[in-house]
Amino acid sequence: MKISKNQPTVAFQGTHYAFSEIAARKYFGQEIETLPCRQFRDVFTAVESGKSDFGIIPIENSLTGSIYQNLDLLLESTVSIAGETSIRVEQHLITCPGISLKDIRVVYSHPQALQQCREFLSSLKNVEIIASYDTAGSVKDIRDRQMLQAAAIASRQAANDYGMEIIREEIEDIPENYTRFYIISKDALTLNNADKTSIIFSIKNLPGALFKSLSVFALRDIDLLKIESRPLRGRPWEYFFYLDFAGNIEKERCRNAIRHLEEITDFLKVLGSYKSADKH
């Protein structure tokens, strides 16, 4: 179930036809307005300021793991998670028309895309690999600047819409390559069908504190879906924990678990309850 709003504006990082924009149209439908942003932080700012109704941020890739920058921004920001979606990511090598693989001297793309295609890129000889701010933006730059010895890694849609050619298809290391995205909003939106909740917490420096923190969910038969740690800035060797669990924060047993958790943590932030993405 999608959030009901006629033609919302959705901010995303990158240029038009980036994977984030493709994911946004999958979630909200094609009839939306999209707002390209240079950096992930700009997506959060657009939502917080009301310039955009929603934002979409990649949070995890099935090959390369979590996007830590966005985990950190969720901690710093006042936004809430309103939903999630996922797409299969097919990475293609894209050039100006008429260019062959032997002509390529440099490949551009977002660092995540480059990581996802490491095996293919390692097979290229005498080719420089350069990280850029966006996948689709790399395609557009090559086209606009007529860089005849350059290639970009991006989506098929980016190649088609910018009038470029795919010279190697599906070059990602593993075909089962999915990216999960969060939908973020300025206000908390807990839908009736929400079945997943995300929180951030830090624990007191006491023996067994992490075990006790996780036990509040086990005692109530609440499934933990993911837990990940991030450094707590300014306090070496201490951590924030990002945790996803199955359940709706409006339900009593989930509220009780959170109240119990508050007693044994020194920081707790509920990021939101939302409908989990469909399984592939």
Image (cartoon, rainbow, N blue to C red):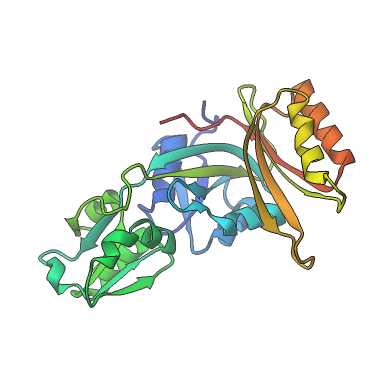
Rendered view: 188 above or below 1: below
Q: How far from the left and from the top, in percent, is residue 7?
A: 48, 38
**Residue occupying the point 46% across, 53% down:** 64
**Residue occupying the point 67% across, 52% down:** 229
Q: Nearer the viewer, residue 234 or 31?
A: 234
Q: How far from the left and from the top, in percent, is residue 267?
A: 82, 49
Rendered view: 225 above or below 148: above
| Left or right of 274, for residue 112 | left
**Whether residue 78 is visible:** no
How many marks do you count on the picture?
A: 0
Q: Quadrant of the C terminus?
A: top left
Rendered view: 5 above or below 46: above
- Image-quadrant location for residue 274: top right
Q: How far from the left and from the top, in percent, is residue 154?
A: 31, 56
Q: How far from the left and from the top, in percent, is residue 249?
A: 73, 29
**Whether residue 226 is visible:** yes
Q: Nearer the viewer, residue 188 or 179?
A: 179
- Image-quadrant location for residue 153: bottom left
| Left or right of 121, for residue 39 | right
Q: Residue furthest left?
A: 98
**Residue occupying the point 31% across, 48% down:** 90
